Image (cartoon, coloured by chain):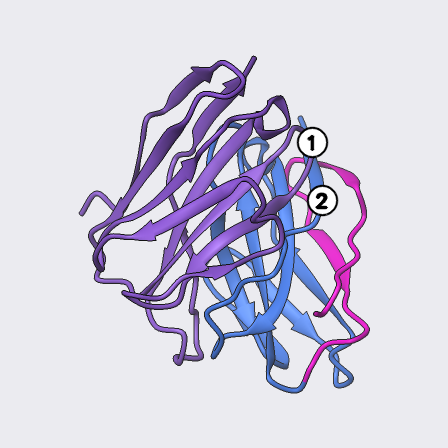
Amino acid sequence: LAKTTQPISMDSYEGQEVNITCSHNNIATNDYITWYQQFPSQGPRFIIQGYKTKVTNEVASLFIPADRKSSTLSLPRVSLSDTAVYYCLVGGSGSARQLTFGSGTQLTVLP
Amino acid sequence: NAGVTQTPKFQVLKTGQSMTLQCAQDMNHNSMYWYRQDPGMGLRLIYYSASEGTTDKGEVPNGYNVSRLNKREFSLRLESAAPSQTSVYFCASRFLPGTTQNNEQFFGPGTRLTVL
């Protein structure tokens, strides 16, 4: 199973761009990279998913280098409401099994 | 659409008591999952059901049983609760394991369980 490593916590200020990097050295060929966001007392919420290069949606961008051993979630112009825990998961979308979420990165956005 | 619903929202048990956590989804998803989340930790997979009629163990299955009652419902049972099972339990569902893009999991609001 592909293990992921993320920073435990990050601080940022409102209006800044935030980049959270996840390391996944033993990612498999058919594995996708997925990021979730979790607010206190809520279940995680899907942010973005990608396989290689760059993926962008209305909320975030995901950058994946050619070797796919890491990925970076980019949140443009964060606000106080982006304060949450962010989880990086690696796994095959073709498999029903989901990997353990890990401890995630606590992002705190300061005014 | 209600999405993924879980009952109860809160529960307090005494050691040795049993209970069943209920989960239902109305999105016609094939796969369903049960996770637990301990304070300050990430989610750990207890059991999952790839499709109606099948169930498989996850990372931490000991002390739990599951039933995929039908396509909509997936229940988690604690036969003899222990203080170590104090946690927040999340149910999730996903559309089709075989699809590739944005195959996201949708999570319920969680059940906060305390075992005394």
* Image location of residue A31, percent across then percent down: 61, 78
User: Residue flagged by tag 1: what amino acid is it?
Assistant: Gly
- Residue B26, position as x, y percentages in the image: 20, 52
Note whether residue A100 is visible. yes
Residue A20 percent location from the top left of the image:
73, 54
- The answer for which chain carries disc 1 is B
- On the same chain, marks 1 and 2? The answer is no
Q: Colour of chain B?
A: purple
Instruction: Identify the residue under disc 1.
Output: B40
- Front-most of residues B100 and B60: B60
Is residue A23 magenta-colored?
yes
User: Residue B113 versus residue B57: which sits nearer the camera?
Assistant: B57
Please say if A107 is above or below A6.
above
- Residue type for callout 2: Ser
The residue positioned 77% from the left and 68% from the top of the image is A24
Q: Residues within 10 Å of mark 2 (few under 14, many from 20)?
A: many
- Residue of label 2: A103
Give the alpha-carbon distance from disc 1 to disc 2, as whole Å: 7 Å
- Kindly indicate the quadrant of the structure image that contains residue A84: top right
Percent coordinates x, y for residue B22 in the rendering: 31, 38
Residue B11 is inside the magenta segment: no
Query: Measuring 72% from the left and 76% from the top, which residue is drawn there?
Result: A27
Q: Could you say which is closer to the camera, residue A63 or residue A88?
A: A88
The residue range painted magenta reads A1-28
Chain in blue in the render: A
Task: Look at the numbered discs 1 and 2 and tell me whether their residues touch, using CB distance below 8 Å.
Answer: yes
